[in-house]
Image (cartoon, grey):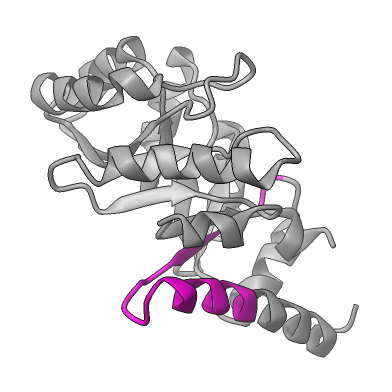
Amino acid sequence: MTNEAYKLYVDEVVRRVETARLNVSGHHIVKTVAVSKYSTVEEIKALYEIGQRAFGENKVQDLKSKAKELEDLPLEWHFIGNLQKNKINNLLDISPSLFHALDSIELAQELQKKLLAKEMTLNCLLQINSAKEESKHGFMPEEAIEKYLQITKECPNIRLKGVMSIGAHSKERESIKQSFETTYAIYKQLPNATICSMGMSGDFELAIESGANMIRLGSILFNE
């Protein structure tokens, strides 16, 4: 695909995001994080050249290497993967803009210890398993508010900014929509929460129309 053809293709994705956003409200703002986990540095640069600034990785080592190679560009790096406790220090060395997948009290407590030792803070999202699927990480919906408030109180170096979830693994639109609406309902009850991150390449329009103000797009931007 030529550079011009690629730009036209990405413009069409942006148009779809805009249409879904306007279906909610002209005042509803949606941020796109380009998930570059299967992409090369050159592909990230190509997307940067046409205006994308926020990129997400789901492996700490990949985030570290790409951030290093692209350190001359003003990119905003997000870590969207599940974080192993033995990788916390490596992640903090990179100091990402946002960690999307805080999925347990134990991880929060360990993260707090490491942040305190380094005299750092980290912006995070609480991951919610809104469809209650065994294959997914995150807090169950009925405990999410309580755990969010607990982390806010007990882990002052963790700056909770809102929530993240992955839509139900289903071909049924109504099931996916219900999982997004569950997450959004929790988000609306959280004090000072500003980010509701949900929606990926296959369901981002539905996520936006269900209240998402941050979406994570991978294959639709890089691999189509």
Residue 95 in view (yes/no): no
Q: Find out whether residue 15 is within the magenta segment.
A: yes
Looking at the rendered image, the quarter that the C terminus falls into is bottom right
Picture residue at 51% right of the left edge, 40% below the top:
178
In this view, the residue in front, 9 or 74, is 9
Relative image position of residue 89 (x, y in whole percent): 39, 24
Q: Which residues are magenta?
A: 14-37
Looking at the rendered image, the quarter that the N terminus falls into is bottom right
In this view, the residue in front, 64 or 199, is 199
Q: Quadrant of residue 69?
A: bottom right
Picture residue at 76% right of the left edge, 40% below the top:
171
Relative image position of residue 7 (x, y in whole percent): 73, 84
In this view, the residue in front, 214 or 124, is 214
Q: Find out whether residue 69 is within the magenta segment.
A: no
Asked if residue 166 lies left or right of residue 163, the reply is right
Picture residue at 44% right of the left edge, 65% below the top:
31
Name the outermost residue toward the front.
174
Name the outermost residue toward the top.
106
Can you say whether 26 is above or below 111 in the image?
Answer: below
Picture residue at 32% right of the left edge, 52% below the top:
195
Residue 8 in view (yes/no): yes
Can you say whether 29 is above or below 175 in the image?
Answer: below
Asked if residue 202 lies left or right of residue 81, the reply is right
